[in-house]
Amino acid sequence: MFSLSKRSAVEPFHAMDVLAEATKRRQAGHAVISMAVGQPSHPTPKVALEAARAALDHGRIGYTDALGTQSLKQAIADQYLGHHGLTIDPARIAITTGSSAGFNLAFLTLFDPGDCVAIARPGYPAYRNILAALGLRVVEVPVTAETHFTLTPESLEAAQATSGKPLKGVLLASPANPTGTVTGREGLKALADYCTERSIAFISDEIYHGLTFVGEEASALEITDEAIVINSFSKYYCMTGWRIGWMVLPERLVRPVERVAQSLYISPPELSQIAAKAALTAAAELDVYKESYRRNRDLLARRLPEIGFSIASPMDGAFYAYVDVSRFTNDSMLFARKMLAEINVAATPGLDFDPLEGHRAMRFSYAGSNAEIEEAVDRIAAWLK
């Protein structure tokens, strides 16, 4: 049985480090299965690839407007009307170089150095890192079974009292990484109302929309026009490497965001915009992929507790299982290293997502094929024995 009794002094081993090491081992001939990174194993939709090929055959790919092409913005607006019954002015939509650029643009436009911004803990580490790099004060709010693994007005009040400074922003992801939490319409409304009453910017990360298995998938835009919504083609649309996403902004923020985008990015890539517009029509193909994730989810929900990993949070959306591994280790970084080195299975240490409690947790992505996920669990089960 694998066992560790002491926290390790080894160099931190983060998600992208896991990916790099897994790639290196794969290139060396090892049969690596990666459950480390939230990257779908399914291909980009056929219609998107066909649209991109046609554009390349045309021979001219260049700059677009800083906030993207009108045709893609209109297509996204049409999606909001069809999926949520919302009429969104395409002028409020900003196309971005992945959701990462969306976060940069939002933070730079909304906040000044020293401002306090609340995020969930455990949560996506890039939030914390980008905010800190911009000189903003990160207020990490613990999300537990008591808060239904999401931010609440009460938890924000408690965190704000501890920080000693008023919050300027709140960032919520639903479905969430790594917890899989889906915050329904009622929870979103409570947060939006709390932020509106206190003039706090409310940023809603909706990049895992389309990948909800349990609960109500609502957009913050259904509740308020003041929310800053960030989304991406990476996850549901299987377009991680195309680096294309979007924001929906309050009208007053469109021009400020555009000015920052002009300076930082010039424009999002035109080829990716062409492919993304086509991908919006691929729901039938993409929902087949979603069912593959659902089968993986059901497998992990059953097998992981059987082999000694208790599920630490809901697996209601996205494609992650966040698990308690304290039966075997209190050093998730070393655990991840050994698991990759000894059985060629890559997963992400919980310390990536929770710097206080994550040494006892791991995140397993189930975005791979059904055969890969089943084989990975079999390897882990044999290893732990």
Image (cartoon, grey):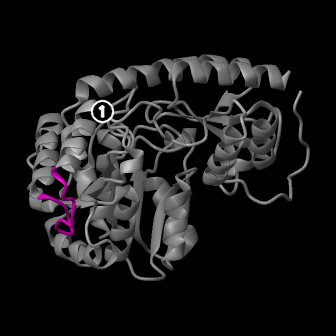
Quadrant position of residue 53: top left
Residue 210, above or below 273: above
Q: Quadrant of the N terminus?
A: top right
Magenta span contains residue 68: yes
Quadrant position of residue 25: top right
Q: Quadrant of the C terminus?
A: top right
* Whole-percent x, y for residue 237 in the image: 33, 38
Q: Residue at x 61, y 53 (%)?
A: 16
Q: Nearer the viewer, residue 146 or 91?
A: 91
Please, what is the three-letter code of the amino acid marked with disc 1? Answer: Pro
Crowding at mark 1 (Cα within 10 Å: few <14, some 14-19, many 20+): many
Quadrant position of residue 384: top right
On the question of residue 9 being in view, the answer is yes
On the question of residue 227 being in view, the answer is no
Q: Nearer the viewer, residue 169 or 363?
A: 363
**Would residue 319 appear left or right of 279 to someone viewing this image?**
right
* Whole-percent x, y for residue 220 in the image: 26, 49
Q: Residue at x 8, y 47 (%)?
A: 87
* Whole-percent x, y for residue 379 in the image: 74, 22
* Whole-percent x, y for residue 242 in the image: 36, 50
Instruction: Provide the secondary structure element on which disc 1 rests.
Output: loop
Q: Number of marks in the image?
A: 1
Q: Nearer the viewer, residue 5 or 164?
A: 5
Residue bearing the label numbered 1: 45
Magenta span contains residue 288: no
Q: Nearer the viewer, residue 267 or 74?
A: 267
**Would residue 178 appear left or right of 234 to someone viewing this image?**
right
The kind of secondary structure the magenta stretch mainly shows is loop
Q: Residue at x 52, y 53 (%)?
A: 124
**Would residue 128 appear left or right of 189 to someone viewing this image?**
right
Residues shaded magenta: 58-69
